[in-house]
Amino acid sequence: MKIWTVMAQKGGVGKTTTVVNLAGALTAQGARVLAIDLDPHGSLTSYFGYDPEQDAGSVHDLFAAAATNEPCDITKQPRRTVVDKLEMITSATALVSLERRCGLVKGMGRVLTRQLPKLAERYDYCLIDCPPTLGMLVINALAACDLLVVPMQCEDLALKSLDRLMRTLELFGNSSGRRLPHLIVPTMFDKRTRASRDTLLSLRCRQDINLWPEVIPVDTQLREAARLGVPLTRWQPEARGAEAYGRLLDTLLNNRTRQLRLAEGAA
């Protein structure tokens, strides 16, 4: 099972949309996919019609059990979605206090690393949706994954969060002893606005990031798909946004860019 973490240190940049539509595109190709919602806000959970206020059977159970050395069977936690071959482990608002309650307990940064292998034969891919703040939940997602996908909204405030992200990756690499391959994905690009064009140009001028050469455009159909609770990549695969996510998936699957070969040259 390949594990991809979708993370950005800013809210509203398209993390959940990216998880949903990559998952939808993968299932359209016949892959078995698990999506995990680590964000206490529960956007991914709500997307598929579950209530993050109901924490029973959620990912919160995994961390609460780990903090008290109690058993918790992750194999019983995935829930069905409306998408064939896509299941998910829901979030819970109780996660918001998890750091304060359990953050100092030994081993809490590797809960997912220990649990996810139990599902390795059941799914081909696992996609993890992260909160925008750095903490124990994000550390879990980074430690467990093979690849980090970073949606970056094409506007100035999102661009300013990029330096924080790169520092986070450097700190993670120093502490874990491995350099995590990552791909920055420009999202919500509107070619009509100067802000979008200038932000994209700034991204393309940076030498310290691994940037996907294309963009995810603004597409109102993405919002409509969210209202319906389905991935646009399954509902209207010919839509602009869906086609863009399809090309992103091709890049991730085929390793066609130097970004995804990063680990080969990393010392």
Image (cartoon, rainbow, N blue to C red):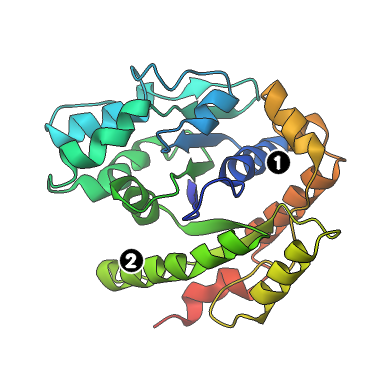
Per the image, label 1 sits on a secondary structure element best described as: helix
- Residue placed under numbered mark 1 in the picture: 25
Inspect this view and state whether residue 30 appears. Answer: no
Tell me the residue at 43%/44% (across/down): 131
Residue displayed at 39% across by 71% down? 167
- Image height check: is 57 above or below 123? above
**Image: 26 above or below 13:** above
Q: Position of residue 256 (x, y in %)?
A: 69, 68
Quarter of image, res 192? bottom right
Asked if residue 120 lies left or right of residue 237, the reply is left
| Residue drawn at point x = 48 percent, y = 45 percent | 1
Q: Nearer the viewer, mark 2 or mark 1?
A: 2
Query: Circle 1: is it few (<14), some (14-19), or many (20+) Cα within 10 Å?
Result: many
Given residues 73 and 221, the one toward you in this image is 221
What percent of the width, then of the height, locates residue 232? 75, 35
In which quadrant of the rendered view does residue 18 lie?
top right
Which residue bears the numbered disc 2?
172
- Residue 262 in the image, given as x and y percentages of width and height: 52, 75
The amino acid type of the residue labelled 2 equals Phe
Q: Which mark is residue 237?
A: none
Which sits earlier in the primary sequence, circle 2 or circle 1? 1
Question: Taking 34 as reference, is 184 above or below it?
Answer: below
**Rounded to the nearest whole Å, what is the CA distance between mark 2 and mark 1?**
30 Å
Q: Nearer the viewer, residue 96 or 141?
A: 96
The amino acid type found where label 1 is placed reads Ala
Q: Position of residue 266 (x, y in %)?
A: 44, 80
Q: Residue at x 50, y 55 (%)?
A: 8
Q: Which quadrant is home to the C terminus?
A: bottom left
143 to the left or right of 88: left
Residue 88 can be seen, yes or no: yes
